[in-house]
Amino acid sequence: LFYQFIYATRFDCMAIGAFWAILLDRDSKWVLSISYNKIIQVLCWFVLVLVAIGKFKIPDFINHDVFSVATAIIILNVAFNDQRLIKL
């Protein structure tokens, strides 16, 4: 029942976004170095494309969490990285 509640409300996804925002606010160098890495950016955009075309197949219990991390890294790059791969 608890898992179904968390799965339906996506509190874990919101917590992941908040976690990345807090680390950015505290100017965490390791978060920025990981997030700004070109390979990580490509991987995150690849995950986003796979989700968009319906080919992202991993176990349900971590599906949304992986997508949340990828999305948080993309948002971080688009908003703050001058060397981002894709400029929106």
Image: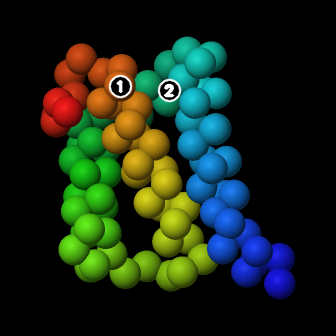
Is residue 43 in view from this perspective?
no
Whether residue 50 is situated above or below residue 21 in the rendered picture: below
> What is the C-alpha distance between the residues marked 1 and 2?
18 Å
Q: Residue furthest left?
A: 86
- Check disc 1 and report the residue beneath it: 79
Q: Is residue 19 left or right of residue 5?
A: left
Between 87 and 31, the residue placed more toward the observer is 87
User: Quarter holding the N terminus?
Assistant: bottom right
Secondary-structure class at tag 2: helix
Q: Residues within 10 Å of mark 2 (few under 14, many from 20)?
A: few
Q: Residue at x 50, y 82 (%)?
A: 59
Amino acid type indicated by mark 1 = Ala
Q: Which residue is mark 2?
A: 30
The amino acid pointed to by label 2 is: Trp
Residue at the spot 20% in from the left edge and 22% down from the top edge: 83
Whichever of labels 1 and 2 marks the residue nearer the N terminus, that label is: 2
Classify residue 4 as left or right of residue 60.
right
Q: Indicate left or right for 88 with 48 as reference.
A: left
Which of the numbered marks, if any, corresponds to residue 55? Answer: none
Task: Classify mark 1: helix, strand or loop.
Answer: helix
Front one among 65 and 38: 65
Give the label, 1 or 2, closer to the camera: 1
**Vertical placement of 88 versus 58: above or below?**
above
In the rendered view, does 59 fall on the left or right side of 12?
left
Question: Horizontal and vertical percent for residue 20?
Answer: 56, 35
Q: Residue at x 67, y 58 (%)?
A: 12
Q: Which quarter of the figure is the C terminus placed in?
A: top left
Indicate the quadrant where residue 39 lies.
top left
